[in-house]
Image: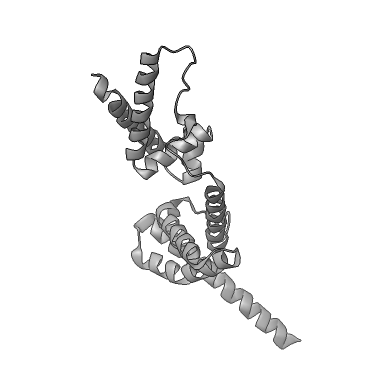
Amino acid sequence: MTGLRIEDDSGAFAAQVATDRHAMLVENVANQRDRNAFQELFSFFAPRLKSFALRLGCDAALAEEIAQDVMVTVWSKAHLYDRLQSSVSTWVFRIARNRRIDHLRRAAQVTLDINDPGFIEPASPDLDPVDAISGAERDARVRAALAELPAEQLELLKLAFYEGLSHRDIANRLDLALGTVKSRIRLAFQKMRNKVTAEDI
């Protein structure tokens, strides 16, 4: 019985040492942008994250993507880690669960269709035929402008107008800076305005 207790204590001690080391490595990444520390974290966690994602039902490609995404987040958000709040392992796998939920939400969303009438103002039945033609031309320009937007800007417009999310909600969902969300949406609108009004000038 004494031998078993010693073995248990030894295992607990080793686990605590590993926990403390991982916390130190994350803090080194946060404070010094220590690439060697990050490499050690990556070597330890990346394969475990992939296995975790596979157990959650992801295919191999998505599991690899989630693992890579989580580790990129560890590098970029290391300054947010607090060893007093949780272990690195708890923090990292919480990020992984959130990424999995994000993927499930995106997969469940309808793919954006640039011909969707939701983007086009419906024509009034009382319109003059000339006005109706003008409106149809404008609709075509709107669709063309949407088709030319970069994917990241198109995604933001979808979240803002299809799902009615605020800029802050979009930033939280996509893990982007609020300023980045605002500037991308503003740029998307400017591109569309230029495209739609170009032939009217």
The percent position of residue 93, horizontal first and vertical second, equals: 55, 60
Look at the picture and state if 138 lies above or below 155.
Answer: above
Extreme-right residue of the structure:
1
| Tally of marks | 0
Lateral position of residue 79 relative to residue 100, left or right: left
**x 36%, y 20%: residue:** 133
Lateral position of residue 144 relative to residue 115, left or right: left
Query: Which of the 4 image quarters holds residue 52?
Result: bottom right
Look at the picture and state if 44 lies above or below 113.
Answer: below
> Is residue 149 visible from the viewing direction of this image?
no
Look at the picture and state if 128 lies above or below 118.
Answer: above
> Is residue 150 visible from the viewing direction of this image?
yes
Q: How is the image coloured?
A: one colour
**x 58%, y 54%: residue:** 85
Extreme-front residue of the structure:
129
For the residue pair 108 and 68, the one nearer the viewer reads as 108
Look at the picture and state if 162 lies above or below 126.
Answer: below
The percent position of residue 180, horizontal first and vertical second, equals: 38, 38
Considering the image in quadrants, where does the C terminus appear? top left
The percent position of residue 88, horizontal first and vertical second, equals: 53, 61
Query: Which of the 4 image quarters holds residue 10?
Result: bottom right
**x 50%, y 68%: residue:** 60
Considering the image in quadrants, where does the N terminus appear? bottom right
For the residue pair 176 and 135, the one nearer the viewer reads as 135
For the residue pair 82 and 96, the one nearer the viewer reads as 96
